[in-house]
Amino acid sequence: MGGAEAELLALSDRLLKSIDGGDWNLYASMCDPSITCFEPEACGQLIAGLPFHKFYFDLPRGSAPKQSTIASPNIRVMGDAAVVSYVRVVQKLDANGGPVSVAALETRVWQKQAGSWKHVHFHRAPL
Ligand code: GLY
């Protein structure tokens, strides 16, 4: 794996950790303000912008742990754009407090802006 690919994989892992840990400031700093997405929460609609995502970060979190693992990643760098695709395995607790795992397909698009990779689009679909 080349330097850019390794950097993008590390960035993707950091992004997921910001989501799992509820770190809005970190998440927002890694995203372009005009980010677009398709994800199950959006009911089949293409959502643009960060406010849709902030809604979830603002929810009370309690102490429920959540941990995402990137499996089978594929990274394609095309100049100042890159596509990172993988299976995201999320460990969390169910309603009874027992550990469960769920998996989803994720594709995240990054764009190099002024020397830094910014997250500009993602698509998540359940497995
Ligand atoms: N729902 C926020 C994200 O997956 O990036």
Image: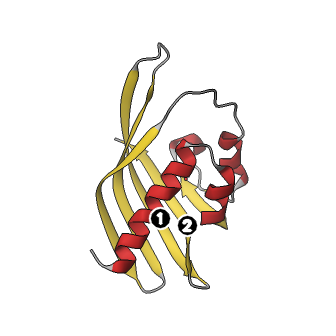
Q: Residue at x 50, y 49 (%)?
A: 17
Residue 126, by quadrant, is top left
Q: Residue 77, percent across and down?
A: 38, 79
Residue at figure coordinates x 37%, y 47% from the top left? 69
Classify mark 2: helix, strand or loop.
strand
Label total for image:
2
At horizontal 54% and vertical 27% (from top left) the residue drawn is 64
31 to the left or right of 16: right
Specify whether 4 is left or right of 19: left
Direction from residue 2 to residue 107 in the image, left or right? right
> In the image, what residue type sits under mark 2?
His
Q: Nearer the viewer, residue 100 or 46?
A: 100
Above or below 60: residue 47 = below
Picture coordinates of residue 26 (x, y %)?
A: 63, 57
Give the quarter of the image for residue 43. top right
Task: For marks 2 and 1, give the one nearer the viewer.
Answer: 1
**Alpha carbons under labels 2 and 1: distance apart:** 9 Å
Which one is in front, 35 or 73? 73
Q: Please name whichever residue, 64 or 126, is drawn nearer the observer in this view of the structure.
A: 64
Q: Which mark is residue 11?
A: 1
Residue position for label 2: 119
Cβ–Cβ under 8 Å for marks 2 and 1: yes
Please state the horizontal and vertical placement of residue 117, each as a whole percent of the image. 53, 75
Residue at the image point whose x is 43% and y is 86% from the top:
79
Q: Quadrant of residue 118?
A: bottom right
Give the vertical position of 24 relative to 4 (above or below). Answer: above
Give how far across and how far down residue 68 sits, in percent.
42, 44
